[in-house]
């Protein structure tokens, strides 16, 4: 496996596909660029999913998140894209991605995207 940023998410077989269980991970060093100003936006990405046949391999997840460092992206778009890419890679039973973006101009932004259900508070 490479150590370069990549949009490729690697997977492995779920060791307990007969059981519903939750995988959670927090990514406190997410960075992308503001598409308007080019300035960096920092966030914590919280992920929670119930795997079906596959799980995401965490080193590939880290490299996947790194791939956004030089990309301009609105908070809403990037959070939804992260969910879409996770769903495409592992086809989970359920998934939720929450992007908590640091203060910018006096505003903290939190975006929640869920699959297949609507987000809840």
Image (spheres, rainbow, N blue to C red):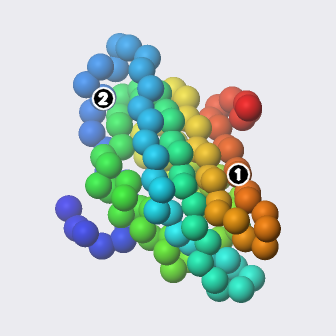
Residue that numbered label 2 is attached to: 14
Q: Left or right? Give the position of 85 relative to 120.
A: left
Residue 50 image position (x, y, % from top left)? 47, 27
Near-viewer residue (74 or 13): 74
Image spot of residue 112 (x, y percent):
68, 44
Indicate the position of residue 52 as horizontal and vertical percent values: 41, 26
Which mark is on residue 110? Answer: 1
Q: What residue is shown at x 46% (from left), y 62% (from top)?
A: 29
Q: Nearer the viewer, residue 26 or 61?
A: 26
> In this orientation, which residue lies closer to the viewer: 14 or 66?
66
Disc 2: CA contacts within 10 A as few (<14), some (14-19) or many (>=20):
some
Quadrant holding the N terminus: bottom left
41 lies above or below 93: below
Instruction: Give the residue at the far left of this rendering.
Output: 1
Mark 2 secondary-structure assignment:
loop
Q: Residue at x 25, y 25 (%)?
A: 15
The disc placed on residue 24 is none
Q: Where is residue 74 in the image (x, y as percent from the top left)?
A: 70, 68
Q: Left or right? Give the position of 98 relative to 59.
A: right
Does residue 84 show up?
no
Name which residue lies at 38% across and 54% down: 61
- Of tags 1 and 2, the one toward the viewer is 1
């Amino acid at each position: 496996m490479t150590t370069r940023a990549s949009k490729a998410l690697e997977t492995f077989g779920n060791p307990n596909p007969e059981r519903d269980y939750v995988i959670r991970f927090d990514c406190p060093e997410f960075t992308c660029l503001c598409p308007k100003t080019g300035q960096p936006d920092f966030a914590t990405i919280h992920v929670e999913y119930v795997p079906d046949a596959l799980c995401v391999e965490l080193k590939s997840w880290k490299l996947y998140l790194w791939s956004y460092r030089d990309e301009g992206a609105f908070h809403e778009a990037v959070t939804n894209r992260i969910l879409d890419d996770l769903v495409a890679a592992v086809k989970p039973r359920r998934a939720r991605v929450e992007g908590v973006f640091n203060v910018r101009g006096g505003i903290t932004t939190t975006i929640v995207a869920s699959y297949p259900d609507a987000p809840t508070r």
